[in-house]
Image (cartoon, coloured by chain):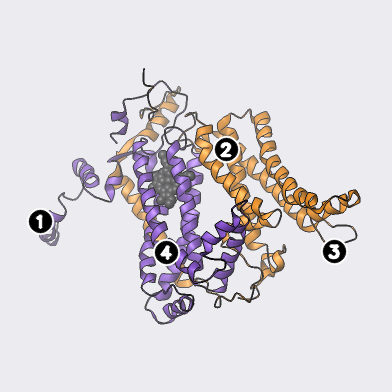
Chain colours: A purple, B orange
């Protein structure tokens, strides 16, 4: 290692933050996973197929990466956006004209949102066609369906916020559909709009759902989803025949 | 009382494959590697590639912003975001409760129920669970697309004698006029029964064909039905997004232009 590298990594402060040396041998390759908050979601070793792009296409990972981009750009947008029917639209115009990187951040937020919907849908399709919903992963598939719904809701609640014609009339279409719910249509519409028409209560309601409630819900559910992937024996591996009787003690298969 | 063993992940080792070549192939596939660097590097690359692509897109393509919301001016066409345009397309052909609430609910419940219906572990972890599944997927996609396009065109263009109206429901009304039925009956027929008939008939006939022709088991029927769902989503979304313009009429993408009222 270079002198500079040593000077950076071999002192008390650096060591107090990060304990292992660079993972070039097997022991440290295990430790880097175990000792890192982000990486410890992974097992220390994975079947080779989990690294084959053509098996998972990385779609679950890309879905969560889109969520990370959306959180960062979204917080940036929150500094400028004003959730009031009189000001929302103009705060966006202002953001695009006068804020450094404002337009870029808004565009990135928008395109990553579309990408997330696409990636989540494709991830579900990958899981389906590889039969990865079969036992013991049934419940994680159900959790996934909840994530799909949350993703649609996040995207749709965000759509109203710019308060332009596009947003207003998309919500009108949505509210009309909700109104046609059998038996409880009126109540559903009232709950969605916070009243009988699209107005300030609607905006504040959807804003709160979009920036706090739904992201928090998604974080909780997605954490469970990841934990379950590990508990269900990690990424699916081929089962060529019925081997119902050949079960291993739970401790060995799940040691990961 | 004896507790039943809970379901557990299957053995990780090489499954019982017979030929030597198969054994070797399986072993290679099931070989384990260290997460660092083998998986972490792939993840990092994927993240960087898409960060760069999306950033480039954000520099070049602006996110749309229409004019200020105006409850007085209804744009034409007024469309939902693209991922709901499949549902909006359905809305053109049937009662709104059916298209906008009941169909999506049934789809979500069906998706969630899937692993409790197709419970055999065989076929896990194999794309399409084998070559038969691949053929079934291709056929199901084709079958669905042909049916749905035909129905969309029929409902758009079917001429009703002696009237300007076009479509299946007006045509039914014309046929049944001599019977002098109360209007509700006509509405229920055109808005509910006929659409429900087709939405059941297409997947059902698909399942029958796949059972007969491929001797499909539960997993393979599930493949056909999931493909029906994905193909419907794709066909309806593309039609709704790129082929519906002024008055929600069917037209070519280059004829659509900017909606009025933005
Ligand atoms: C916000 C949305 C979602 C995120 C961030 C997410 C993330 C992930 C990740 C990172 C994995 C590991 C393997 C991989 O990358 O393919 C995974 C596996 C899995 N996901 Fe998702 N997922 C989401 C939505 C869904 C949906 C909509 C479904 C299905 C309806 C689903 C069902 C599953 C199942 C069954 C597995 C285990 C697959 C296997 O063992 O091969 N997930 N998910």
Give the CA separation, mark 1 to mark 3: 84 Å
- Read off the chain for label 1: A
- In the picture shown, does residue A208 fall above or below B197? below
Real-space Cα distance between discs 4 and 3?
47 Å
Front position in the image: B96 or B36: B96
Mark 2, ligand 1, within 8 Å: the answer is: no
In this view, the mark in front (4 or 3): 4
Q: Which mark is residue B164?
A: 3
Q: Position of residue B123 (x, y in %)?
A: 49, 31
**The numbered mark 2 sits on a residue in which chain?**
B
Badge 4 residue CB within 8 Å of ligand 1: no
Q: Secondary structure at mark 1?
A: loop
Of labels 3 and 2, earlier in sequence is 3
Q: Quadrant of the N terminus of chain B?
A: top left
Quarter assignment of residue B26: top left
Q: Residue B223's mark?
A: 2
The percent position of residue A220, horizontal first and vertical second, equals: 36, 50
Q: Chain for mark 4?
A: A
Density class for disc 2 (Cα within 10 Å; few <14, some 14-19, many ≥20) is many
Relative depth, front residue between B59 and A109: A109
Work out how far the residue at label 4 is from the one at label 1, CA to CA, in angstroms.
Answer: 47 Å
* A78 is higher (above) or lower (below) than B14: below
Pointers 3 and 2 in contact (C-beta within 8 Å):
no
Q: Which residue is the site of mark 4?
A: A208
In this rendering, do the residues under marks 1 and 2 share a single chain? no
Whether the residue carrying mark 3 lies under 8 Å from ligand 1 is answered with: no
Residue depth check, mark 3 versus mark 2: number of the one nearer the observer = 3
Q: Chain of mark 3?
A: B
What is the number of the mark on residue A10? 1
Point out the image quarter for the C terminus of chain B.
Answer: bottom right
Q: Are marks 4 and 1 in contact (CB under 8 Å)?
A: no
Mark 1 neighbour class, 10 Å CA radius: few under 14, some 14 to 19, many 20 or more: few
């Amino acid at each position: 290692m270079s002198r500079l590298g040593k000077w950076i990594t071999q002192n008390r402060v650096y060591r107090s933050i990060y304990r292992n040396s660079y993972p070039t041998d097997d022991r440290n390759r295990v430790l880097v996973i175990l000792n890192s908050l982000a990486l410890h979601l992974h097992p220390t070793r994975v079947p080779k197929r989990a690294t084959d792009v053509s098996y998972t296409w990385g779609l679950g990972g890309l879905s969560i990466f889109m969520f990370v981009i959306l959180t960062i750009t979204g917080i940036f947008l929150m500094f400028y956006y004003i959730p009031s029917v009189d000001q929302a639209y103009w705060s966006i115009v202002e953001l695009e004209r006068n804020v450094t990187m404002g337009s870029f951040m808004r565009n990135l937020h928008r395109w990553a949102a579309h990408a997330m919907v696409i990636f989540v849908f494709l991830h579900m399709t990958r899981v389906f066609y590889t039969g990865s919903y079969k036992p013991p992963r049934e419940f994680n598939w159900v959790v996934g369906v909840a994530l799909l719904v949350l993703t649609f809701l996040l995207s749709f609640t965000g759509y109203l916020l710019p308060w332009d014609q596009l947003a207003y009339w998309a919500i009108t279409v949505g509210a009309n559909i909700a109104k046609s719910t059998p038996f409880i249509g009126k109540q559903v519409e009232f709950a969605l709009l916070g009243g009988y028409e699209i107005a300030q209560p609607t905006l504040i309601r959807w804003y709160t759902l979009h920036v706090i409630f739904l992201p928090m819900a998604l974080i909780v559910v997605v954490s469970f989803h990841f934990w379950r992937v590990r508990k269900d024996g990690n990424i699916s591996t081929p089962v060529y025949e019925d081997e119902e009787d050949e079960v291993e003690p739970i401790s060995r298969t799940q040691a990961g | 009382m004896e507790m039943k063993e809970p379901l557990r992940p299957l053995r990780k080792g090489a499954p019982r494959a017979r030929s030597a070549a198969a054994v070797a192939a399986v072993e290679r596939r099931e070989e384990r590697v260290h997460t660092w660097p083998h998986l972490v590097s792939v993840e990092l690359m994927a993240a960087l590639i898409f960060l760069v692509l999306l950033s480039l897109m954000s520099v070049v393509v602006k996110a749309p912003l229409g004019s200020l919301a105006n409850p007085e001016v209804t744009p034409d066409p007024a469309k939902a975001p693209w991922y709901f345009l499949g549902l909006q397309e359905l809305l053109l052909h049937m009662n709104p409760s059916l298209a906008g609430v009941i169909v999506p609910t049934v789809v979500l419940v069906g998706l969630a129920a899937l692993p409790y219906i197709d419970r055999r572990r065989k076929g896990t972890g194999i794309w399409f669970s084998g070559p038969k599944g691949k053929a079934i997927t291709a056929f199901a996609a084709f079958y669905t697309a042909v049916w749905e396009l035909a129905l969309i065109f029929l409902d758009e263009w079917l001429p009703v004698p002696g009237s300007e109206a076009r479509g299946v429901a007006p045509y039914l009304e014309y046929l049944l006029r001599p019977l002098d039925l109360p209007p509700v009956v006509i509405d229920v027929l055109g808005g509910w029964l006929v659409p429900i008939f087709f939405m059941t008939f297409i997947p059902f006939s698909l399942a029958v064909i796949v059972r007969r022709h491929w001797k499909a088991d539960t997993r393979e029927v599930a493949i056909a039905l999931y493909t029906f769902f994905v193909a419907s989503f794709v066909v309806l979304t593309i039609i709704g997004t790129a082929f519906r313009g002024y008055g929600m009429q069917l037209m070519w993408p280059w004829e659509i232009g900017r909606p009025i009222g933005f």
